[in-house]
Amino acid sequence: MLAGELPDARTAAVRELRDPESGGLLDEALVLRFDAPASSTGEDAVELQCHGGRAIVDAVLRALESINGLRAAKPGEFTRRAFENGRIDLTEAEGLADLIEAETESQRKAALAVAEGGLRKQIAQWRERLLGLSAMAERAIDYDEEDSGTDPALTEACRSLGDELFDWVHRPRAEPLKDGVRVVVAGPPNAGKSSLINAIAGQDRAIVTETPGTTRDHIEVPLSLGGIPIVLTDTAGLRATEDPVEAIGVARAAALMEGSDILVWLGDAPDSPEHSRAIKVHAKADLPERGEAPAGALAVSSVTNEGVGPLLEKIGALARALLPAEDQIALNRRQAGLLAEAADALANSSDDPVLVAESLRIARNAFDRLTGQAGLEDVLDALFGRFCLGK
C-alpha cells in the first residue's frame, strides 16, 4: 500500500507515502478517505495532500501508476462521474467549467452562483409547478364529463409560467460575461484608432505610423475594465481601396462593427454608422488644428491621455448594462434556448386539455435536457473536455 492503513472516513491523518515496489519514503502527506455516496463523485475516494514540489508530485504519480488497476483520470472525469452519479446536474457542471476558466471577479461570481446550484434550484421550482399543472390537465382529460374546454385557471397558470421563463430568457446572457464585451474601435485611416488602443491597453499592441492603411487586419486586446471583461478590437481604416489585402481588412472591419456590442467611432460624427451603443470620439484633441469637439463627441488625446478616463467610464457603463447583475443567475446559449423552448410550449396553451397536457410534456422534456436528465452525449463530451486533467 502506498499510504498504509487508511484513516476513518472523513478524517484527516498524516501518513508516510512509500513506493509500493521499493518501500522507499516518498513524502509525508495528509490522507483523507471518503466513502460512497458521501464524496464529490458519489464513489469511494482517497485524497493525498502531499507537498507541492514537482519532484515529490512526480514520484507519487509514478508510484500510483505502478499499482495494478490505477490510471490517470481523463480531463473532466471526476466532474463527469459526479454528474453521472447524481451528485450534480448539468447546469452545475457548466458552472464549474466556467468557474475554472474565470479570469475576472464578475466571471467568478456568476460562475459560482451556477456551480453552487442556483439554477438547479430554480429549475426544480419550475418543474414542481409544471408537474402540478400536468396533474390538473390529466385530471381534466380523465374526469371532466362535459366538453367545456380547458379550465381558464389552468390556461392562465401555464401562460404565467411561460411569461416568467421568457423573462429569464431575455435577461443579459452569460456569453458577454465569459467571452468579454466586444468593443470595436473604427473610423477612417489615420483617425488615431491604433494609438487609442495602445493608450487604453497601456502598451504598444497595434502598429502606429503616419501611412494610411497600416492596419490591414483586426487586432484584439482582452482587458478587464473595473472587473468587466472586454475585448478591445482595432480595425482597418474604412476607405475605398484597390489594394486587395487592405480591401479584405476593410470588409472585416465592417463586419466587426456590425457584430460589436459597443462601437467607438473615431471618424466625423455625421459619418458614424447606425449603432445602438455607439460612442463618438473626437480623436487627436491635442492638435490645435483639430479644434473643438462637435456636440455629442468626446474629446480624446492618446498623447496627453485627455478624455481617455471619461471614455473608459462610458465604455464601462455601456458594458455593465450588457452583463447580468452580480446577484443574478446568467444563462448560457444552451440553457436560454431550452428555456425558450419550454416557454414557447406554455405560451401556446390551447382550449383542449389534451393539447395542454402535450404542451406541458414538451416543457418538462426541455427541463430534462436542461439539467441533463435526457440524452445529451454530444453536449457532455464537449463540456467535460473543457476541464483540466482529472478535474
Image (spheres, helix red, strand yellow):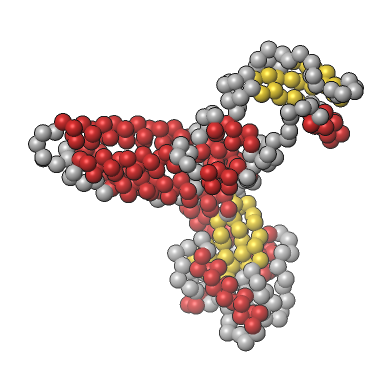
Q: Is residue 141 left or right of residue 17?
A: left
Compared to 214, does 64 lie above or below?
Answer: above
Question: Quadrant location of residue 47?
Answer: top right
Q: Nearer the viewer, residue 199 or 23?
A: 23
Q: Residue at x 76, y 13 (%)?
A: 5
User: For the point 18% across and 32% down, which residue is it?
Assistant: 142
| The image quarter in which residue 298 lies | bottom right
The number of callouts visible is 0
Q: Nearer the viewer, residue 382 or 198?
A: 382
Q: Residue furthest front?
A: 68
x, y percentage for residue 112? 56, 37
Please identify the residue farthest to the bottom as the structure is shown.
242
Give me the residue at 61% from left, 24% from top. Answer: 43
The quarter of the image holding the N terminus is: top right
- Percent from the top left, x then y, of residue 78? 63, 33
Residue 194: image x %, image y %? 67, 69
Where 188 falls versus 316 (above or below)? below
**Residue under the point 74% across and 29% down:** 70
Could one spot residue 287 in this view of the protein?
Answer: no
Name the side, left or right, on which 53 lies relative to 337: right
Q: Position of residue 347 (x, y in %)?
A: 28, 48
